[in-house]
Image: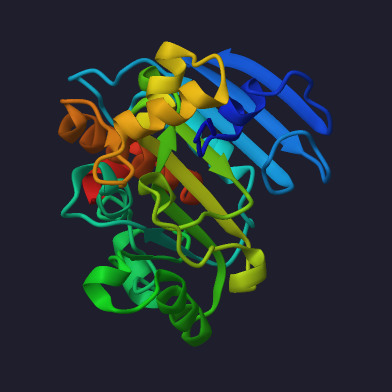
Amino acid sequence: MQIRTDLALEESELQTHNKGINTITKRTADMKITRMDIKENSSVNREKGTYITCEFKALTDNFTAADARVCEIGDQIRSLIPREGTVLVAGIGNHNITPDAIGPKTASKILATRHIQGDIASSLGFEGLRSVCTLSPGVLGQTGIETGEMIEGIKSMTDISCIIAVDALASRRLYRLGCTVQISDTGIAPGSGVGNNRLALNRETMGVPVIGIGVPTVVDAATLAADLISPDNEEESDKLREMVYYNSRGMVVTPRDIDLLVERASTLIGMAINVALHPDISPEDIYALI
């Protein structure tokens, strides 16, 4: 049975021998941070590039803008983005479906500054702000327009140097839901977390660097069952797959408190992106502005 995961770290855990991968792991700010540089023809089924996975304990009720994880994740994001130019932050997903709402909720917490220029910026003391714009494009079923087409159209009309795309992902482990962030310079496939892949957003399709940021919010039901039961042969795997598929449709599992997880995770990511884009402003000041 195929194990489904959108996390490069989990994909590497499935391999007996990892070749073509350089991995550095550190622990800081109550987090475990794993940076994987994947080369061509590696043993991991992922695009060549850098994947940074931040793992932390479940976010507490007293999460604040000054949380040390904000600055640490912000530093990881900053390490992958160009130092200059306008950045478009795109919140991918359907805000009406909670496990898929990470992107839109994160976009709503981004400090948009592209329109604050010249005398207005000076009068507000914002001369050092980087030019940032944000977008929640919805999904194809809502708009009739591919997310990639919408973003490409905006890019063609504006001077965007980089795109940060935030979306929901799928994990193979329940304990990683809502408390894991994957950052990569290989872009993102909209809808990947709920098995509804669309036009990929990456440097090849967009013409500029695309940083993909994702949080796992679901586990594929068949993957979860396989991990729990560990079928011994293909026949058992097929029987297990039939048991967890509803009317031949794939199912996903999400935590009961997914509303809380999504709200907290989107706040953390949104603040981390703001810190990455505006390093000269304190997290507290940014939080006050949004």
Q: Total label count?
A: 0
141 and 281: which one is in front? 141
Q: Residue 174 appears in which quarter of the rendering?
A: top left
Question: Can residue 113 be seen at all in this image of the molecule?
Answer: yes
Question: Can residue 280 be seen at all in this image of the molecule?
Answer: no
- Location of residue 131 with respect to 34 vertically, above or below: below
Q: Residue 261 appears in which quarter of the rendering?
A: top left
Indicate how the structure is coloured in the image.
Answer: rainbow
| Residue farthest to the front, as pictured | 235
258 and 2: which one is in front? 2
* x 37%, y 15%: residue: 57
Residue 112 vs residue 165: left or right? left
- Location of residue 77 with respect to 139 vertically, above or below: above
Residue 7 vs residue 100: left or right? right
* x 49%, y 38%: residue: 74
Rendering coords of residue 287 (x, y %): 26, 42
Rendering coords of residue 134 (x, y %): 35, 64
Residue 73 vs residue 33: left or right? left
* x 25%, y 24%: residue: 63
Rendering coords of residue 223 (x, y %): 43, 28
Q: Residue 127 appears in which quarter of the rendering?
A: bottom left
Rendering coords of residue 36 (x, y %): 69, 31
204 and 123: which one is in front? 204
* x 16%, y 35%: residue: 259
- Location of residue 119 with respect to 199 vertically, above or below: below
- Location of residue 172 with respect to 165 vertically, above or below: above
2 and 190: which one is in front? 2
